[in-house]
Amino acid sequence: MKKKTIITEENYLKYYYDIPYEGSTSAGKPLRKLRNITCPYTGIKIVPGTALKPFEKGLSSCENVSDVVNLLSEYSDNLLPTEKSVYAIFKDFAALNPYDNTQNCLQMIYTNCLRKLKLEEFEVLDEVDRLSKKLSPTTALKLREKTTKCRQLILNDNQKDSFKRKAFLSSLDEIEPKDNEQEIFNDIKNKALFLPTSGSSKNAFVVKYSGRTQTEAARRIFIASTGSIEHIVPQSYGGLNTIGNFLWTTASGNRFRENMPLPWYIKRFPKIPNYAQKYIDDVIREIHNGKLEGNETYPYKIKQKLLDASEGRILISLSGYKYTEAAAAEAEREYHNRWDKYRSND
């Protein structure tokens, strides 16, 4: 008999959203306890992990689109743009077809959304081709072979042989640019990351989830706003599993960045520096309220890490923080000394 997987807060995102989630990283656990935190990437308030079980319980009893809309309405202010637009589609559909389901709703608009999605994909490929002109003819031709194949797959309506974003991104690693082309080629690969996903495009969401169950679609909308541990410097670039390299972000913000260098991500979302300031302000509020004990230097670590990783684009202020850097370090030492004494006497 196949062993049943037990879904917990730690593995929830791994199973339902397929993102790099550091749920087992002990250094990130203090961040998951914070509440009412602004996502530094998206600017929305992160849905805490404590909301997972109540949402799942409510979702299990949803029979139609009206039930789904009512369940999601509690989190409507926390929804990200793509998810909020799909929620609005469900809401309008429920007003006319209250006892129908979300799957039929998405299937009604599938064809039109698929056409728009293809145009979105072409726009990114057009930009990749434009940048290829900066490469040598040999390297540019290899890249054009990749994008040409993608265009053919996009125009092909055969579902068994369709365009796959991940496959295209992986195929770029097969090209070996010359040494003097590496910087340009990195720019091209970063541009390719902007190919639409269900987290960045309403049309991609509709196309992907029109064939999924009502439960899957509703869960996906909710999960995008829940918290996820994010590496400021990705592990693939040598980033460490320490709290000084962690942000508490939405699952969608984490997933959409992937391994994209932070300056490129900021270029795509120029408000990130402002959101990062709100994030730190919220964290400071929580520390002042007695949360994050033993990590009082976290704001200072994150300030420096974001400054370095963003190449100076994110400069946050800690003017509202009651601790100087020295006082924060002392508070941490006192906390750990008390904890060590407690354990030794246990």
Image: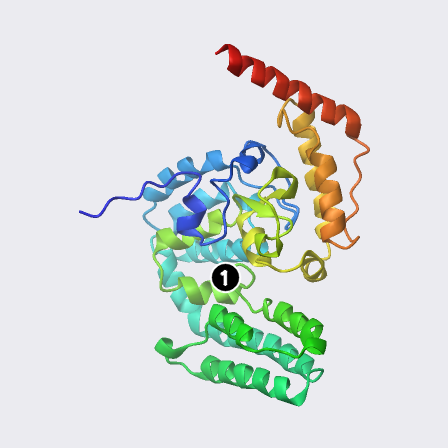
In-image side of 315 versus 76 (left or right):
right
State the image coordinates of residue 95 (x, y, percent, origin top left): 44, 54
Front-most of 59 and 341? 341
Rendered view: 219 above or below 93: above
Which residue appears at 49% of the width and 37% of the height? 49
Front-most of 75 and 128? 128
Q: From where the camera sits, is residue 343 visible?
A: yes
Residue located beneath label 1 in the image: 198
| Badge 1 element | loop
User: Looking at the image, which residue sits at the far left?
Assistant: 1
- Going by the numbered disc 1, the residue's amino acid type is Ser
User: Looking at the image, which residue sits at the far top?
Assistant: 345
Which residue appears at 56% of the width and 61% of the height? 200
Front-most of 333 and 100? 333
State the image coordinates of residue 215 (x, y, percent, origin top left): 36, 51
Q: From where the camera sits, is residue 70 visible?
A: no
Rendered view: 334 above or below 118: above
Which residue appears at 63% of the width and 25% of the height? 294
State the image coordinates of residue 148 (x, y, percent, origin top left): 53, 85
Badge 1: residue crowd in 10 Å (few <14, some 14–19, many ≥20): some
Rendered view: 323 above or below 242: above
Q: How is the image coloured?
A: rainbow
The quarter holding residue 259 reads bottom right
State the image coordinates of residue 178 (x, y, percent, origin top left): 66, 79
Rendered view: 36 above or below 313: above
User: Looking at the image, which residue sits at the far right?
Assistant: 319
In-image side of 3 versus 276 (left or right):
left
In-image side of 140 versus 114 (left or right):
right
